[in-house]
Image (cartoon, rainbow, N blue to C red):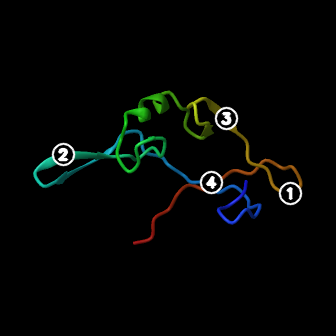
Amino acid sequence: MKNWEGETKMARVVRCDGSRPYLIQVGGQNVAICACGLSKNKPYCDGTHKITRDEEAGKIYAYDEQRNRIVVQVTDENGNTVTLPAETVDE
């Protein structure tokens, strides 16, 4: 993967656990903000979260540009499977 300067960089994994959009009011209108990370109209929801409804808990998924899904297995530098920690939020 190359960045905007043409340098090769590691891919960045972003955790998106939302299965429906965040609904907010702006100027008296309801606006749906993407929470799944898959919308092609970010930051707005385009309904793509619907394809995530049958994801299994504990599995990691990746989606390509055509929204095809694959199960991802994370390994360390020795090839050992790594379990990602649960997300925590510090307030």
Q: N-terminal of the two: label 4 or label 2? A: 4
Q: What distance separates the C-alpha of mark 1 from that of mark 2?
A: 46 Å
Q: Nearer the viewer, residue 87 or 14?
A: 14
How dense is the environment of label 1, judged by Cα within 10 Å: few (below 14), some, or many (20 and up)? few
Nearer the observer: mark 3 or 4; the answer is 4
Quadrant housing the C terminus:
bottom left
Q: What distance separates the C-alpha of mark 4 from that of mark 2?
A: 30 Å
Mark 4 = which residue?
Answer: 13
Furthest residue in direction front, as rendered: 5
Disc 1 + disc 3, Cβ < 8 Å = no
Q: Callout 3: helix, strand or loop? A: strand
How dense is the environment of label 3, judged by Cα within 10 Å: few (below 14), some, or many (20 and up)? few
The amino acid sitting under disc 2 is: Asn
How dense is the environment of label 4, judged by Cα within 10 Å: few (below 14), some, or many (20 and up)? few
Disc 4 + disc 2, Cβ < 8 Å = no
Q: Position of residue 36 (x, y in %)?
A: 45, 43
Q: What distance separates the C-alpha of mark 3 from that of mark 2?
A: 34 Å
Mark 3 = which residue?
Answer: 71
Disc 1 + disc 2, Cβ < 8 Å = no
Q: Position of residue 70 (x, y in %)?
A: 66, 32
Q: Callout 4: helix, strand or loop? A: loop
Q: What distance separates the C-alpha of mark 4 from that of mark 1?
A: 17 Å
Residue drawn at (50%, 27%), measured in percent from left and top?
Answer: 54
